[in-house]
Image (cartoon, helix red, strand yellow):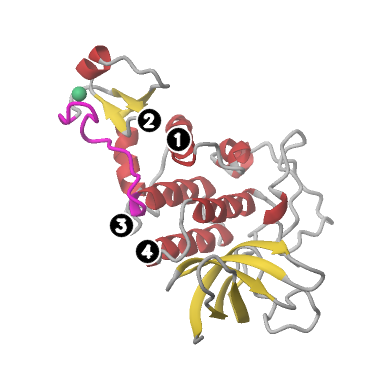
Amino acid sequence: MPAEHATALVLRCVDFSESSLVVTLFTREFGKIEALAKGAKRLKNPFDSALDLMSLCRIVFLRKSSEALDLVTEAKLLRRFRCPGWDLAPLYAGYYVVELLRDLTARYDPLPELFDLADSALQGLSLGEPVWRWVFRWELGALRLLGHLPSWESCVICGKPIQGSLRVAFRAVEGGVVCQPCQKAHPAPAPTLMVDQGLLRSMAVLAEPAHPAADRLEMDPVHRTQLRHLLDLVIGTLLGRQPRMHPYLPGLMQEPQRRKTPAPSPERHLPVAPAGPPPAASGPKPPEDEKPSS
Ligand SMILES: [Zn+2]
């Protein structure tokens, strides 16, 4: 069996035995793989401490048949996710990026553009770029690349372009906006959201990873809240449940000074990828299996 070489993002590390891990990786060349990393928990191992959640690495692996786990034999760290300061929001946003990447993709379905978008999002978050913007760019870009982007230019029922109204009805189950006549003629059994036309224009920019305005687009808090509700509906409908990082998302939409995260004391040391104290006293803990492996 020939050894495969790939560039990979680490999506999950789960203990397998005293010394080994089962890792879920998203590779640029092969898509998502699940593999055994034998001896990864030993002090001396061939993985260069690269198999940590959200790390970017080069790997060598042996591809196994059908449902069996692949075998990672080497890993070299290219970049570790680092939280840019005391604020934990970029870290939680990073957890969300890898959660969606894991849950929205199938094994061995290579999507290099999706890999590049996730990689850019993790890099942007660790550089301290606005968290809300990267969360929206990631969600909308991923929906576009996976063919699940909602329709926002024409009515999903009659197909006519949406014109002339400031607020538009949006139905996640039906996959997009609904014009006023269709809204009256076909009452919705599922929740309908009223969104501003201006928000739909911002969504078009954020959904296009290479759009020249995407990395400097500004959005007021009202539109951020509307878009959060809209994407919660779309992604919840797509997954059939809410993502596990869902309870944190509203907090990530605010500027750092408006978040409710308690300010850390200066002497508190933040590890490279902390096990994750909750951002608010009442908030849930991040999923257990998404802690770094170290
Ligand atoms: Zn219509």
The residue at which mark 2 appears reads as: 173
User: In terms of sequence position, does the residue under pointer 3 or pointer 2 come before the other?
Assistant: 2
Residue corresponding to mark 4: 113
Label ID, residue 237: 1
Amino acid on which the number 4 mark rests in the picture: Glu
Q: Amino acid at mark 1?
A: Thr
Q: Amino acid at mark 2?
A: Val
Q: Which residue is mark 3?
A: 212
State the residue in front, 56 or 200.
Answer: 56
Percent of width and height locating residue 227: 43, 35
User: Is residue 150 magenta-colored?
Assistant: yes
Q: Earlier in the sequence, mark 4 or mark 1?
A: 4
Say what secondary structure mark 1 lies in.
Answer: helix
Residues tagged 4 and 3 counted as in contact (Cβ below 8 A)? no
Label 2 to label 1: alpha-carbon separation? 7 Å
Q: Are marks 4 and 1 in contact (CB under 8 Å)?
A: no
* Front: mark 2 or 4: 2
